[in-house]
Amino acid sequence: MSHVTAKTLKEGTDFEKKHVPMIECKDTVKPNEIYEVKIHTAGVEHPMEDGHFIQFIELNVEEYPLLRVQLTQYAKPDVVVNVKAPNEEHVGRTLKLVAYMFCNLHGPWKYEKEVKIQ
Ligand SMILES: [Fe+2]
């Protein structure tokens, strides 16, 4: 996804809220902890119908790809994944989770959330 410029925002219009991939998870985690990360639209449901739907959701940790889920109009654009925190050598570090949601008509959208290792 580094070749595209995604739109990033925290608050916005209903149009923006149905495309931005909100990340929900803990703000701090322990080393090696398995924690749940949810990705979903930012408060307004996106249509999932013929000709207009979310094609994929992607989650990266920093610049490293963690997962990519392909979707069609027959799926709900929500993802829940269990992520493993880095080991003790990373205590005190802050990781950036980066989510992308790609609409077939409205392109890529981006959201970032920081998670601290402690
Ligand atoms: Fe859209």
Image: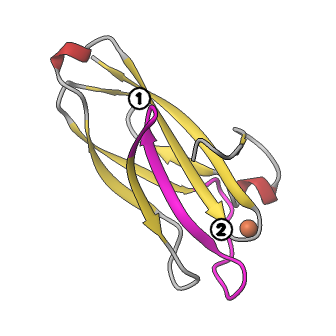
Q: Which stretch did the figure color magenta? A: 41-65
Q: Position of residue 22 (x, y in %)?
A: 57, 48
Query: Which amino acid lies under the numbered mark 1 shown in the image of this protein?
Result: Asp
- Horizontally, is 64 left or right of 83 in the view? right
Q: CA distance from mark 2 to mark 1?
A: 25 Å
Q: Residues within 10 Å of mark 1 (few under 14, many from 20)?
A: few
- Horizontally, is 52 left or right of 112 in the view? right
Residue for badge 2: 45
To which quarter of the image does residue 29 belong?
top left
Q: At numbered mark 2, what does the secondary structure look like: helix, strand or loop? A: loop
Q: Residue at x 46, y 45 (%)?
A: 24
In this view, the residue farthest toward the bottom is 50
To which quarter of the image does residue 32 belong?
top left
Q: Position of residue 106 (x, y in %)?
A: 76, 63
Q: Residue at x 67, y 51 (%)?
A: 109
Q: Residue at x 71, y 78 (%)?
A: 52
Q: At numbered mark 1, what does the secondary structure look like: helix, strand or loop? A: loop
The colour style of the image is secondary structure
Vertical relation: 87 (above or below) 1? above
45 or 9: nearer the viewer = 9
Residue for badge 1: 27
In this view, the residue farthest toward the front is 3
N-term mark: 2 or 1: 1
Q: Is mark 1 within 8 Å of ligand 1?
A: no
